[in-house]
Image (cartoon, rainbow, N blue to C red):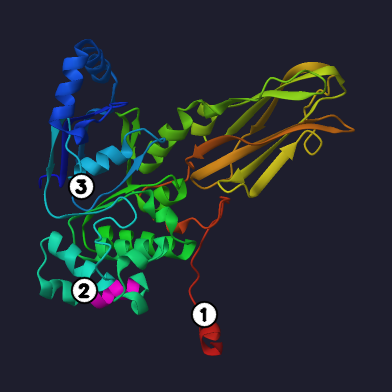
């Protein structure tokens, strides 16, 4: 078995926060401050030393050649710190990283570009940094320029490029100059939808066709699910999960507090939704169970609940309420309680979805909570060997397929 392309062992990174940098004032000023007020200097030193936090803590990770790994986590989880260490932009506090092969990183807009040089010159500069010869870069140049789609501006200094132009050229350079490891951060969010689609296709090609390794950070869970085969979840600098991409996305969303969402506590002057809960175990079984707790200053006869499931952009996919589906509903008269909606088979492909909830009675709508919950659903039909692009749309339907040979009569008519 070949050695992993990326080997991370007990990796930790500590930062000092709130430190007052005075080095630019020179040694003479530092000595003067110390002589005049040694106690203040000592207190300041102690305070600075204590104001630290761990961006990463004892992270262990191995990535094989050809893997596409999504790095997932909330803001501040340590994703960018990990990528900066892997890209050799910053040094770890402890632990070590072994990288086999050339690494191309796209972490920020204009990464690796010299603003005074033209786009053409920066392509050759980046290639040289990666250890490529001028002949190798020249062979790839037309392909890079076509992908970036900025032919007219290749001989213009990069400092005059728009943000979108910088991103297009930076990604084209990083993805086409044949690194063994390609590291891409959320910077692709700057591009338009068509460019993002082109980038995802290129990264898929880099991994599947060229056998290179991709590390991809994004808050677009749909892009992660469609591109990555594996996911690692970071939380407060600690590696929480390392599994297939759908398992990692489930950990990221299903283990958070978003599945019990409380609304603001308001005076009970009218009927209100108090909180909404999703049953995680039901989701694992491929079912949906939503519980809507409510309170009212007067009797609701009966209390009516509604649930709408939307995609990640808030586009409604389907909905249900007790007016539409009254079967089995006892129609009580109540001022408080919990309305429970159960869908025995959730007809969705694997992906990120949201819940809208509302409260009413037979005559009036009282309260609505839009996008109150977010969840990641792994379809029971999901099979890792099937490409994600095989799933079209959001709704999953049961179907059977059969083959029928062409009869002689049909063949003649064709």
* Residue 138 in the image, given as x and y percentages of width and height: 17, 76
At x 42%, y 64%, the residue is 195
The residue at which mark 3 appears reads as 87
Tell me, yes or no, whether the two marked residues, 1 and 3, touch with CB atoms within 8 Å. Answer: no
Q: In the rendered image, is residue 408 in sight?
A: yes
Dot 1 or dot 3: first in sequence order is 3
**What whole-number distance in Å separates the C-alpha atoms at marks 1 and 3?**
61 Å
Crowding at mark 3 (Cα within 10 Å: few <14, some 14-19, many 20+): many
Mark in front: 1 vs 2: 2
**Which of the two residues, 403 or 334, is positioned nearer the viewer here?**
334
Residue 241 falls in image quadrant: top left
What's the mark number on residue 407?
A: 1
What's the mark number on residue 140?
A: 2
Tell me, yes or no, whether the two marked residues, 2 and 3, touch with CB atoms within 8 Å. Answer: no
Residues rendered magenta in the picture: 141-147
Dot 1 or dot 2: first in sequence order is 2
* Residue 301 in the image, given as x and y percentages of width and height: 88, 23
* Residue 87 in the image, given as x and y percentages of width and height: 20, 47
Q: Secondary structure at mark 1?
A: loop
Mark in front: 2 vs 3: 3
Left or right position of 217 against 275: left
Mark in front: 1 vs 3: 3
- Is 194 colored magenta in this rendering? no
Taken as a whole, is the magenta stretch helix, strand or loop?
helix
**Which of the two residues, 206 or 37, is positioned nearer the viewer here?**
37
At x 58%, y 50%, the residue is 395
């Amino acid at each position: 078995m070949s050695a992993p392309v990326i080997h991370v062992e007990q990796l930790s990174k500590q930062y000092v926060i709130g430190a007052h940098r005075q080095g630019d004032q020179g040694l003479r000023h530092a000595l003067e401050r110390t002589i005049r007020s040694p106690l203040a200097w000592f207190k300041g030193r102690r305070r600075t030393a204590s104001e630290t936090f761990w961006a990463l803590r004892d992270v262990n990770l191995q990535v094989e050649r050809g893997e596409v790994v999504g790095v997932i986590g909330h803001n501040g989880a340590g994703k960018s710190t990990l990528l900066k260490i892997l890209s050799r932009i910053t040094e770890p506090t402890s632990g070590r990283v072994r990288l086999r092969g050339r690494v191309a990183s796209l972490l920020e807009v204009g990464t690796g570009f010299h603003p005074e040089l033209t786009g053409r010159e920066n392509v050759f500069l980046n290639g040289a940094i990666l250890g490529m010869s001028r002949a190798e870069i020249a062979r790839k140049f037309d392909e890079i320029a076509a992908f970036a789609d900025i032919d007219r501006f290749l001989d213009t200094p990069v400092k005059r490029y728009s943000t979108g132009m910088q991103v297009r050229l930076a990604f084209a350079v990083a993805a086409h100059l044949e690194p063994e490891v390609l590291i891409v951060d959320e910077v692709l969010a700057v591009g338009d939808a068509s460019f993002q689609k082109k980038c995802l296709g290129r990264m898929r090609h880099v991994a599947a066709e060229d056998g290179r390794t991709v590390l991809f950070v994004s808050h677009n869970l749909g892009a992660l699910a469609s591109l990555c085969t594996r996911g690692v979840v970071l939380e407060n600098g600690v590696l929480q999960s390392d599994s297939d991409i759908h398992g990692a996305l489930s950990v990221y969303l299903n283990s958070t507090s978003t599945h019990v969402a409380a609304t603001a506590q308001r005076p009970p002057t009218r009927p209100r939704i108090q909180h909404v809960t999703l049953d995680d175990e039901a989701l694992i079984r491929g079912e949906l169970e939503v519980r809507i707790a409510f309170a009212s200053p007067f009797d609701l006869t009966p209390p009516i609940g509604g649930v709408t499931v939307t995609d990640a952009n808030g586009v409604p996919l389907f909905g249900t309420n007790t007016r539409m589906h009254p079967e089995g509903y006892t129609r009580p008269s109540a001022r408080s309680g919990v309305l429970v909606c159960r869908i025995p088979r959730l007809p969705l492909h694997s992906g990120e979805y949201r819940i809208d909830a509302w409260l009413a009675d037979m005559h009036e709508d009282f309260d609505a909570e839009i996008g109150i919950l977010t969840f990641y659903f792994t379809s029971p039909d999901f099979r890792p060997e099937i490409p994600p692009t095989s799933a079209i749309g959001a709704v999953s339907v049961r179907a059977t397929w059969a083959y029928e040979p062409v009869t002689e009569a049909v063949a003649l008519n064709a």
